[in-house]
Image (tube, rainbow, N blue to C red):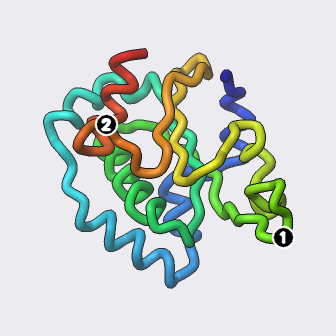
Amino acid sequence: MNIDRAQIEKRTVSIDQYLLTLDERFREKFITAKSTYQLKQETIEQLRPIAGEYVIVVFSAAWCKDCAVIVPALALVSEATGLEVRIFGGLKKDVLNPSCKWRIPPSPPEVQTFGVDKIPLLIVFNRQGLEIGRIIEKAFHRPTLEDELSDIIKTS
């Protein structure tokens, strides 16, 4: 799948903006997770020179426990490498309509476009807008988030 980066930028927020706009009760969990995550410096050093060639689009919700772990770690990776991260936040389940997973709005219509089933969903795109990989929930094959991102980028 390809993306129009200008459209994605209009419809999303940066990871820093996302963390700042979270409701107070959720923001504390995210900030605590961010302050306790230890980056794997060797992998960060490998990502830093190539980070500008990629953008990560994330689907997230403040109520999601996995998002409260992954998004803060991703914020640290972004800060340490310059990797651009854009967030579609505020996803809400549609409990009244069993045929639809997400209630639109408040969930963005892009949940359908990108086939979002589980969150957090991290989609890695190259600068040309071509999807090169996904991370769904905490389904890592490598020990850390940054290792997983590095593997996706190396194999693209």
Give the residue at mark 1: 96
Q: Position of residue 130 (x, y in %)?
A: 60, 19
Quarter of the view holding residue 86: top right
Residue 117 location in percent, x, y?
Answer: 64, 48
Q: Quadrant of residue 82?
A: top left
Mark 2 lies on residue = 141
Quarter of the figure that contains the N terminus: top right
Residue furthest out toward the front: 98
Query: What's under tag 2, amino acid-wise?
Result: His
Instruction: Return the residue found at the far bottom.
Output: 25
Q: Are marks 2 and 1 in contact (CB under 8 Å)?
A: no
Mark 1 or mark 2, which is nearer the start of the sequence? 1
- In the drawing, does residue 40 fall left or right of residue 6? left
Q: Amino acid at mark 1?
A: Leu
Quarter holding the C terminus is: top left
In front here: 5 or 138? Answer: 138
